[in-house]
Image (tube, helix red, strand yellow):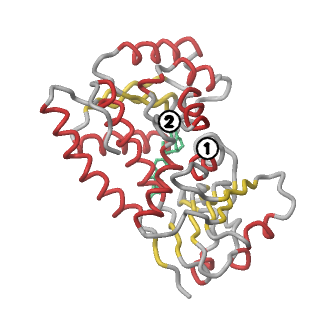
């Protein structure tokens, strides 16, 4: 068997095309959505992601507000920029690019953000709403994964999903999204404390690999026909991405989200969705998403 590709680039392009019309409709009503970003430090990967977010904004007509601080910035300096973005009327939604430099209390920074402008769905209020089943911004990578599966007709309802990893942007919120009534999956969360990872993986209909361990998921771990989404990012000596999923998995799985080209573009598309929906809510226009 050779797996079919869960094509994040094409799916994200379809979402962006829909958003372009929604942004135009907002602008016709006098509302211009604006995405703010705060990048602290000079990590080339983080800079690439932030620049990509602003390129996406330009494509769909969302305004950009870029803030940067050096890696030496103090907690107070970072919090001052967060307050400025909270008060800035041109910024209808924003993100603080993660990770923040060592020594910075990222949770304190996230808590200080205006939850109404949370474009990442990672504010404690947004995560709390997700737990309570109340509408709000959804975490970009987990919901991007749901959209990618849906777009390709992969059944989530009733599926056994194994999530590998428990980081703040993917692993921790992923089960919260997948166990909503609208997704209705049964989720097992695995992590470095899991005793027999292979045993869990072998019973999964869908695997979300977000451990950051190169080629952790081997062909013999995967049930034939399963959907496997590679979200892990490690780099080889040339700086090339090495995912969590061994290339041989494509011979066993029914579906594979490659890395790059799978989930990453969906993360960016979902961010745009959150920005547009925050602007629609702020303008009292409700959401269609
Ligand atoms: N505040 C946040 N910080 C981080 C998040 C996040 O969702 N919010 N997620 C990641 C980084 N990230 C977005 O910020 C992100 C990661 C990957 C991609 C992407 O499109 N990747 C490409 C490949 C890129 C490459 O070659 O290096 C792909 O998968 O095709 C977009 C966004 C951590 N921080």
Q: Is residue 70 above or below residue 160?
A: above
Quadrant into which the N terminus falls: bottom right
Q: In this orientation, which residue lies closer to the viewer: 79 or 263?
A: 263
In the image, residue 15 lies at what x, y percent? 31, 54
Contact (Cβ within 8 Å) of mark 1 with mark 2: yes
- Sort mark 1 into few (<14), some (14-19) or many (20+) by Cα contacts within 10 Å: many
Residue in the image at 79% along x and 64% along y: 197
Instruction: State left or right for residue 90 relative to residue 6.
Output: left
Residue in the image at 24% along x and 53% along y: 17
Farthest-out residue, left: 28
Quadrant into which the C terminus falls: top left
Q: Which residue is mark 2?
A: 121
- Quadrant in which residue 111 is drawn: top right
Instruction: State left or right for residue 246 relative to residue 3.
Output: right
Farthest-out residue, right: 195
In the image, residue 228 lies at what x, y percent? 59, 68
User: Which of the labelled discs sits on residue 173, or is there none?
Assistant: 1
Instruction: State left or right for residue 12 relative to residue 128.
Output: left
Q: Is residue 141 above or below residue 85?
A: below
Residue in the image at 42% along x and 54% along y: 266
Farthest-out residue, front: 181
In the image, residue 261 lies at what x, y percent? 44, 63
In the image, residue 54 lies at what x, y percent? 32, 39
């Amino acid at each position: 068997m050779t797996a079919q590709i869960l094509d994040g680039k094409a799916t994200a392009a379809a979402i962006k095309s829909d958003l372009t019309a929604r942004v135009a409709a907002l602008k016709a009503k006098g509302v211009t959505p604006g995405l703010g970003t705060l990048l602290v430090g000079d990590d080339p990967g983080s800079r690439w992601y932030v620049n990509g977010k602003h390129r996406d904004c330009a494509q769909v007509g969302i305004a950009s507000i870029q803030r940067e601080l050096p890696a030496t910035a103090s907690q107070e300096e970072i919090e001052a920029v967060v307050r400025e973005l909270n008060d800035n009327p041109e910024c209808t939604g924003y993100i603080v690019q993660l990770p923040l430099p060592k020594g910075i209390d990222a949770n304190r920074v996230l808590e200080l953000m205006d939850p109404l402008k949370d474009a990442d769905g990672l504010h404690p209020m947004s995560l709390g709403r997700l737990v309570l089943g109340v509408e709000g911004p959804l975490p970009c990578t987990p919901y991007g994964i749901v959209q990618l599966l849906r777009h390709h007709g992969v059944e989530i309802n009733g599926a056994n999903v194994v999530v590998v990893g428990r980081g703040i942007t993917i692993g921790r919120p992923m089960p919260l999204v997948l166990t909503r009534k609208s997704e209705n999956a049964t989720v097992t969360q695995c992590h470095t404390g899991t005793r027999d990872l292979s045993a869990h993986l072998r019973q999964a209909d869908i695997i979300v690999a977000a451990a950051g361990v190169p080629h952790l998921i081997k062909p013999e771990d995967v049930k034939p026909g399963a959907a496997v989404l590679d979200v892990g990012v490690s780099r080889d000596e040339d700086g090339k991405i090495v995912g969590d999923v061994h290339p041989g998995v494509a011979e066993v799985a029914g579906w594979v989200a490659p890395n790059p080209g799978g989930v990453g573009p969906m993360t960016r598309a979902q961010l745009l969705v959150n920005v547009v929906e925050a602007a629609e809510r702020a303008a009292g226009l409700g959401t269609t998403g």
